[in-house]
Amino acid sequence: GDAMVGCGGCERAAGPPVMSYVGGGHGNYTQETIYKYVGHGAGEFDVVTPKKKDFTCVFISGGVSLLVLVIVVVLLILPAPTTTTTATSTLPYNCNDGLSMMDAWSISKKAYCCENANRG
């Protein structure tokens, strides 16, 4: 509709239009015994719709702002996800792998497993 955002809230029509003083050179009518049309912008009076303050837009924007603030605070308060890392060894040979076929092991694997794992 005719909602206008002004300082302090939104305005909307509060009743039927009435003849009101709008300032010199801003209206379409001038005051005599009756109102006389003198041309666009030549008079001091015009038909305007009274405005009523409507703070609905202020409440809605305030509520949305509060919701965004709560979401940001919750996201900042939540603990960061924990990550676990498993230590991997960089051993040259797995001495537990292929125990049933130790005869097929290379000479270097047999020597390493014999010294470090007492296998082979």
Image (cartoon, grey):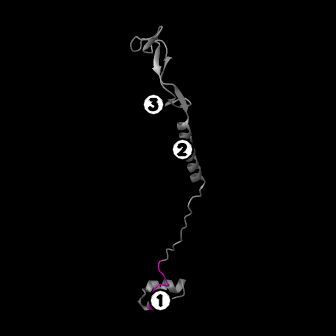
- Name the mark on residue 99: 1
Name the residue that disc number 2 marks.
64
How far apart in space, not on screen, are marks 3 and 1 (Cα)? 87 Å
The answer for how far apart the CA atoms under marks 2 and 1 are is 67 Å
User: Viewer-nearest of labels 2 and 3?
Assistant: 3
Disc 2 crowd, CA 10 A, few/some/many (<14, 14-19, 20+): few
Give the main secondary structure, helix, strand or loop, of the magenta stretch: loop
Residue nearest the observer in this picture, 33 or 107: 33
Question: What residue sits 48% from the left and 81% below the top?
Answer: 94
Out of 5 and 84, give the one closest to the viewer.
5
Q: Is residue 63 visible?
A: yes
In three-dimensional space, the C-alpha distance between marks 2 and 3, rounded to whole angstroms, equals 23 Å
The residue beneath circle 3 is 2
* Quadrant for the N terminus in the image: top left
Q: Is 33 drawn above or below residue 51 in the view shown?
A: above
| Residue in front for this viewpoint, 37 or 106 | 37
Residue 77 percent location from the top left of the image:
61, 53
**Element assignment for label 3:** loop
Q: Residue furthest right?
A: 77
* Residue 89: x %, y % from top left: 51, 74
x, y (%) of residue 22?
Answer: 49, 17
The earlier-in-sequence mark between 3 and 1 is 3
**Above or below — where is 62 with respect to 34?**
below
Q: Which secondary structure, mark 1?
A: helix
Instruction: Give the magenta-colored segment's residue range.
Output: 92-100
Q: Of the residues under marks 2 and 1, which one precedes in the sequence?
A: 2
Residue at (53% x, 84% y) in the render: 115
User: Of marks 2 and 3, which one's residue comes earlier in the chain?
Assistant: 3
